[in-house]
Image (spheres, rainbow, N blue to C red):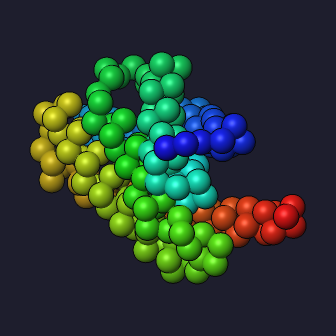
Amino acid sequence: MDFSTRQIANLGVLAAVSIVLTRVFGFIIPVAGVGALRISFGEVPLILGGILFGPWAGAVTGLAADLIGYAINSHGGAFFPGFAISAALTGLIPGWILHKHRENLQWWQVGATVLITDLITGVFLNTLWLTILYGQGFFVILPARLLARLVTLPIYTLAVFLINRAYQAYRRGVQ
């Protein structure tokens, strides 16, 4: 994990954008009396961090965004390290899968990676963390979380694909 100054600056911007999208523009929908469903687009910068700068850079971005974001605005909840792990994995998994192919990604590759990442972190792990934290049944919370993913999956895919394409075009023009 040897990051250049430029990479650190870019990752800091991605973490900041993630914090704003999650903490300011995100909203929580109660499910079974628990704030179990947060709709936000804060995962997009984490996924981009992994794809553009590598899996470890994505993991660091996710971890930083979660820890700093919690310190800024906790949404009234207690700190739970499981969510920090999920955020780190949200940056790590796409970087691990797509970083080496980032220059010619197809939309279906991005979509499949976003789906895999979201199933592992957003659906399984975050539902597990909420179950542990609030004592609600896993399968009570799961259906609403799956439904929300049907909405966010195409938006995440399109955003990541288009931003990656624009960034790669920019890099080709600069060099």
Asked whether the viewer can see residue 80, the reply is: yes
The answer to whether 175 is drawn above or below residue 69 in the figure is below
Point out residue 42 in the picture as x, y percentages from the top left corner. Answer: 53, 45
The answer to whether 98 is drawn above or below residue 92 in the figure is below
Q: In this view of the protein, which residue sits in the foreground, 173 or 19? A: 173
Quadrant holding the C terminus: bottom right
Name the residue: 62% across, 62% down: 159
Q: In this view of the protein, which residue sits in the foreground, 90 or 174? A: 174
Question: How many numbered marks are there?
Answer: 0
Quadrant assignment, res 167: bottom right
Quadrant assignment, res 16: top right
Asked whether the viewer can see residue 158, the reply is: no
Point out residue 56 in the picture as x, y percentages from the top left corner. Answer: 46, 48
Name the residue: 29% across, 28% down: 80
Name the residue: 39% across, 20% down: 76
Point out residue 141 in the picture as x, y percentages from the top left corner. Answer: 23, 48
- Left or right relative to 135: residue 168: right
Point out residue 48 in the picture as x, y percentages from the top left corner. Answer: 58, 55
- Left or right relative to 75: residue 126: left
- Left or right relative to 124: residue 104: right
User: What is the residue that sits farthest to the front in this orientation?
Assistant: 2
The answer to whether 142 is drawn above or below residue 68 in the figure is below
Name the residue: 34% across, 44% down: 86
